[in-house]
């Protein structure tokens, strides 16, 4: 959004520009703003999803905020967010840098790495669930003791599996972003570094990484805000279990709303999700500095 | 991906709102004019019988039409509630009766069928009287009982019992004594699809009844204060945890889902010795288990008594029937089609097919058909349980309101994982049913 205010004014006919934004605006209002307002209103009601909606003030909010399930779900959500960021970011940067090279075998590998991104989350979850089945899964089939753990039945392991599968699915996407970022870095910087006698590793840390600063912020924002809404994969893979070990906020919202028929509290959680997501997105923008929109390519 | 996450959030937020809008506007469900719609569960062999009944009806009534759609069990439970709330319900609503039906009836979402049953008394007289309990809310009938009676049965693998050299349990103490014998041979004593939650629930249904009698859970349904803290309830919960601690259930039961039939596979492949499951399991074992059923390897019995328990060992738990309701939001023409389906189609065509896959239809006077079936022994066994049980406890998650049921299922999983004590379980449930 700041891109609209950032660049210096040009002499284009200004009356045309607002019209160009209209389709996006309609979609945004229809699918984001209207539901948001609706959910906010619903959070002050009691509704079982079937009968009449009754205004009950802060009852739902009180129920949600005093429920020990909320801090737990928040904690699991942040843990998934943090751990999957720590796992995904270095992997994506390295893979992205590797794929940025022009050699043909790298292009072939790039296509292979891209495969997980083309599968639906539900399909991935079902496949992993079958592979990790303690009795009929991969470990039992290959008779490998180390592989036939109760992967999805023990809280710590199940959490690890969720992070692993999430990373497996999304590392390709972030690699793609980094690949683009690396290819944007001017060759002249590397040539200058070579003249100064910098090796490959030194070049990576002194040129590639600093130049990727804004790519890191973009990718991290997508990861962090996206992980708030992880739902499909976890729902199919563990159902939030075992117990509530992998019950993230989005899943908690769904379970309350659609399984327990408590639409009011579910809407309150939805509002909390939106607020947390907005706060995180703003925080990450701050980390990027005030000139986040400015070009870093030449003459930096 | 960014797009899909964003859309997901948008969707998650949009669903309740669109539900509000349609509910307020009283707008119509899909296909208001023309044929009736009918949603039910998929999964063979049951799906085939249901689809067959619809086909037969459509063929016999060229001017009327029912369009059917199938769903997976756990997905359906959520989908149907949302659809009804959004005014998008199918004409014919397939369900389990009980607490969920009560919620529909109190919200005026399903037709009162009492007068229809008065006019069509021959339909009512032809069905098990016990099947109407879960269809009745405050003295009015809101659903047509259908399909089969499904008590919960203790299945066992005869081959495995022979191999280990032990006899089927006749009491709870026998069960606890069998557990180490099977574990020593590397065979799981009990298969359990614990991720599905209601599978664990069946254990508590029996333990509560055998130890404390049906009054203990009845008190909880009726909203009595501290019903779950009854000493017999605490004993039942403790016994269950004893069984978990003794490794009574298959390794990794928390991650096994019943919808995938992996728990059934454990029994017929001989990796587990016993399994507590619904009567419908027989048909699954027959379809999936190769010659497991035909070779006589599948054993079955009622849940044994618990030493010192107050419950009658003839009591059973499970689903007294399935239920078909008519959406009150459907058009007059659709309602007529649905009622014609109730009057002529249901059961008539299906009885033989249900018997063929090892189920007992809720239609009276089928003894001869049952006896002539290749599954005669099992069918007679189920028929006897259903007709002789002094008390037929409806599945807890269907008897309770959806909100209480969700809390109960969550806490049952924690109980099985030993992450809460029986006392904590009781406290958590008292808070939702005794309020």
Image (cartoon, coloured by chain):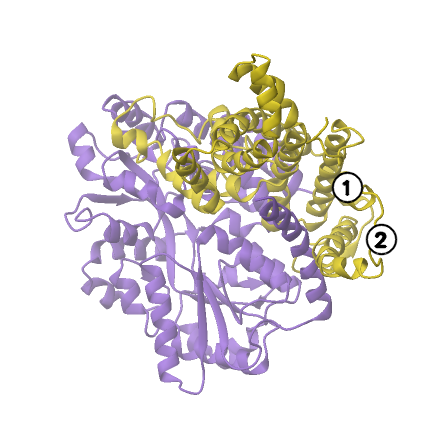
Chain colours: A yellow, B purple
Decide if residue B219 is in sight here. Answer: no
* Of callouts 1 and 2, the N-terminal one: 2
Vertical placement of residue A140 versus B278, above or below: above
For the residue pair B149 and A203, the one nearer the viewer reads as A203
Q: Residues within 10 Å of mark 2 (few under 14, many from 20)?
A: few
Q: Which residue is mark 2?
A: A11
- C-alpha span from label 1 to label 2: 51 Å
Using the image, name the chain to which the residue with label 1 belongs: A
The N terminus of chain B sits in image quarter: top right
Q: Which residue is mark 1?
A: A61
For the residue pair B125 and B270, the one nearer the viewer reads as B270
Q: Is residue B244 left or right of residue A204?
A: left
Numbered disc in front, either 1 or 2: 2
**Residue ID at (51%, 32%):** A100
Label 1 SS: helix
Residue B6: which numbered mark, if any? none
Q: Position of residue B370 (x, y in %)?
A: 24, 63
**Residue ID at (66%, 63%):** B107
Vertical placement of residue B71 versus B333, above or below: above
Q: Is residue A178 left or right of residue B190?
A: right
Q: Position of residue B206 (x, y in %)?
A: 42, 41
For the residue pair B215 and B419, the one nearer the viewer reads as B419
Label 2 SS: loop
Using the rendered view, name the quadrant where residue B60 is placed: bottom left
Same chain? Circles 1 and 2: yes
Vertical placement of residue B66 versus A56, above or below: below
**Residue ID at (59%, 62%):** B83
Decide if residue B331 is in sight here. Answer: yes
Using the image, name the chain to which the residue with label 2 belongs: A
Q: Residues within 10 Å of mark 1 (few under 14, many from 20)?
A: some
């Amino acid at each position: 959004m700041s891109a609209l205010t950032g660049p210096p004014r040009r002499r284009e006919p200004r009356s045309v520009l607002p019209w160009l934004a209209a389709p996006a605006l309609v979609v945004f209002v229809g699918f984001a703003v209207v539901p948001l307002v609706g959910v906010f209103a619903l959070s002050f009601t009691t509704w079982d999803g079937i009968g009449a909606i009754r205004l009950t003030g802060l009852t739902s909010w009180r129920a949600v905020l005093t429920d020990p399930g909320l801090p737990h779900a928040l904690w699991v959500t942040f843990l998934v967010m943090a751990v999957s960021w720590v796992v995904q970011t270095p992997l994506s940067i390295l893979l992205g840098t590797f794929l940025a090279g022009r050699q043909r075998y790298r292009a072939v590998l790039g296509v292979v790495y891209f495969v997980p991104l083309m599968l639906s989350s539900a399909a991935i979850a079902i496949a992993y669930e079958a592979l990790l089945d303690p009795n009929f899964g991969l470990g039992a089939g290959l008779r490998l003791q180390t592989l036939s753990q109760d992967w999805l039945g023990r809280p710590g392991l199940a959490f690890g599996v969720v992070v692993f599968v999430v990373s497996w699915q999304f590392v390709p996407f972030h690699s793609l972003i980094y690949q683009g970022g690396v290819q944007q870095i001017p060759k002249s910087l590397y040539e200058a570094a070579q003249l100064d006698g910098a090796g490959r590793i030194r070049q990576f840390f002194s040129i590639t990484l600093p130049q990727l600063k804004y790519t890191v912020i973009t990718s991290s924002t997508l990861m962090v805000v996206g992980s708030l809404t992880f739902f499909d994969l976890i729902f199919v893979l563990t159902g939030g279990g075992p117990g509530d070990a992998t019950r993230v906020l989005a899943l908690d919202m769904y379970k309350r709303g659609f399984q327990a028929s408590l639409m009011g509290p579910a809407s309150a959680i939805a509002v909390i999700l939106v607020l947390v997501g907005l706060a995180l997105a703003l925080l990450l923008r701050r980390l990027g500095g005030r000139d986040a929109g400015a070009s870093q390519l030449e003459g930096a | 991906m960014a797009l899909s996450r964003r859309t997901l959030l948008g969707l998650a937020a949009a669903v309740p709102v669109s539900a509000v809008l349609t509910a307020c506007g009283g707008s119509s469900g899909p296909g208001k004019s023309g044929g009736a719609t009918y949603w039910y569960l998929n999964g063979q062999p049951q799906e085939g019988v249901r689809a067959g009944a619809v086909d037969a009806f459509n063929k016999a009534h060229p001017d009327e039409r029912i369009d059917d759609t199938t769903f997976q069990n756990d997905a359906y439970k959520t989908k149907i509630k949302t659809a009804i709330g959004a005014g998008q319900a199918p004409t014919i609503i397939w369900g389990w009766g009980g607490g969920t039906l009560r919620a529909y009836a109190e919200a005026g979402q399903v037709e009162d069928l009492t007068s229809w049953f008065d006019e069509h008394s021959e339909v009512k007289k032809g069905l098990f009287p016990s099947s109407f309990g879960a269809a009745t809310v405050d003295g009015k009938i809101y659903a047509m009982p259908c399909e089969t009676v499904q008590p919960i049965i203790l299945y066992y693998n005869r081959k495995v019992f022979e191999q280990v050299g032990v006899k089927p349990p006749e009491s709870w103490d026998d069960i606890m004594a069998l557990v180490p014998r099977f574990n020593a041979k590397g065979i799981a004593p009990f298969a359990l699809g614990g991720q599905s939650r209601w599978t664990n629930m069946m254990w508590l249904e029996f333990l509560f009844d055998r130890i404390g009698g049906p009054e203990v859970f009845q008190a909880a349904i009726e909203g009595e204060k501290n019903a779950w803290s009854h000493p017999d309830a605490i004993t039942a919960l403790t016994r269950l945890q004893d069984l978990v601690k003794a490794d009574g259930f298959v390794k990794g039961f928390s991650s096994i889902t019943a919808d995938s039939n992996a728990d059934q596979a454990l029994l017929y492949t001989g990796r587990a010795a016993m399994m507590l499951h619904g009567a419908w399991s027989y048909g699954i074992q027959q379809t999936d288990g190769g010659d497991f059923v035909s070779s006589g390897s599948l054993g079955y019995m009622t849940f044994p008594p618990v030493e010192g328990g107050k419950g009658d060992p003839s009591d059973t738990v499970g689903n007294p029937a399935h239920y078909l309701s008519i959406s009150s939001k459907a058009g007059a023409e659709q309602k007529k089609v649905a009622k014609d389906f109730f009057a002529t189609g249901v059961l008539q065509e299906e009885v033989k097919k249900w018997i063929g896959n090892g189920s007992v239809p809720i239609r009276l006077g089928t003894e001869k058909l049952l006896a002539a079936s290749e599954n005669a022994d099992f069918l007679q066994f189920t028929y006897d349980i259903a007709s002789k049980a002094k008390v037929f406890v409806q599945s807890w998650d269907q008897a309770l309101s959806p909100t209480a049921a969700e809390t109960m299922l969550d806490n049952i999983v924690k109980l099985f994982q030993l992450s809460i004590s029986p006392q904590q379980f009781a406290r958590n449930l008292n808070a939702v049913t005794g309020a």
